[in-house]
Image: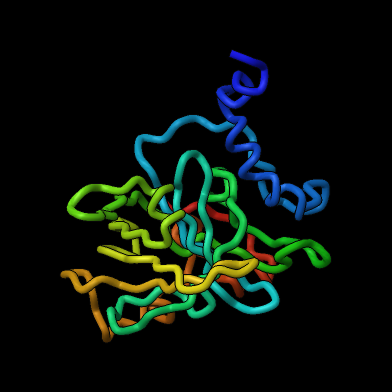
Amino acid sequence: MDKQKSRAHIPGMKQKRQLKNYRERRDFRRTPEPAGEEHGRRQGPIFVVQKHDARNLHYDLRIEVNGVLKSWAVPKGPSTDPEQKRLAVATEDHPMEYAEFEGVIPEGEYGAGQVIVWDTGPYENITEKNGKSVPADEAINHGHLAVWLEGQKLKGGYSLNRFRRERQEQWLLGKMKDKEADPQDDLLTRQPQSVLTGRTLEDLRNGKETKKKE
């Protein structure tokens, strides 16, 4: 095996390539965001939704795939109504450590503003084609991903469907019609707080200290 091929099989090499864009955009001497070092294996794949008040308030949906968090910015946030399709703009892959990041990104840095972990939990890839399961990375490449979420707030089936390829791919995020669907629930307004600390974005702006939920 030549050196080029052997390097491709070194653990973490693929993740480092995937996180190149993430790291180039940030000055880790200033931002409290994680740089993305080696991490231990989890029992199963997770998802996280972070509420992020940057230039515009939005929600960042992140789904663990092959050791990184595939990410989409959802301006209006996820909905529990199957009739509501939400724009989701693909962004750079994030490191696994970002799943627990909560804090204030300083002015002048990429994504400056307050961030809380609005929801998180395990997920299952339920994407199928012609009756056969499709791996999550292949599903994303093909432009259709279906997942079952078991978050503290979001539950049930959701789908991501790409409809436009540009510098930043545009997708639609939609709730599936299942027992967890609820067209009447304004979940974003009803539960604005972090699932990790109980804080809101306003608490961060006011300098409230982190306090882990019991």
Q: Quarter of the image for the N terminus: give it.
A: top right
Nearest the eye: 153 or 83: 83
Colouring: rainbow
Where does the image place residue 63, in percent across and percent down from the top left? Answer: 45, 53
The relative height of residue 86 versus residue 43 in the rendered view (above or below) is below
The relative height of residue 212 versus residue 187 in the rendered view (above or below) is above
Nearest the eye: 179 or 161: 161
Q: Residue at x 35, y 45 (%)?
A: 135
176 relative position to 36: left or right: left
Nearest the eye: 52 or 15: 15
The image quadrant that residue 178 belongs to is: bottom left
Where does the image place residue 211, in percent across and percent down from the top left? Answer: 55, 54
Nearest the eye: 18 or 105: 18
Q: Residue at x 72, y 51 (%)?
A: 32
Q: Is residue 203 visible?
A: no
162 relative position to 180: left or right: right
2 relative position to 116: left or right: right
The image quadrant that residue 205 belongs to is: bottom right
Q: Residue furthest top?
A: 1
Q: Residue at x 34, y 58 (%)?
A: 151
Q: Residue at x 20, y 55 (%)?
A: 130
Where does the image place residue 173, in percent across and percent down from the top left? Answer: 40, 71
Q: In the rendered picture of this protein, how many numbered marks are placed on residues?
A: 0
Where does the image place residue 49, in percent across and percent down from the top left? Answer: 47, 62
Q: Is residue 28 visible?
A: yes
The relative height of residue 178 versus residue 40 in the rendered view (above or below) is below
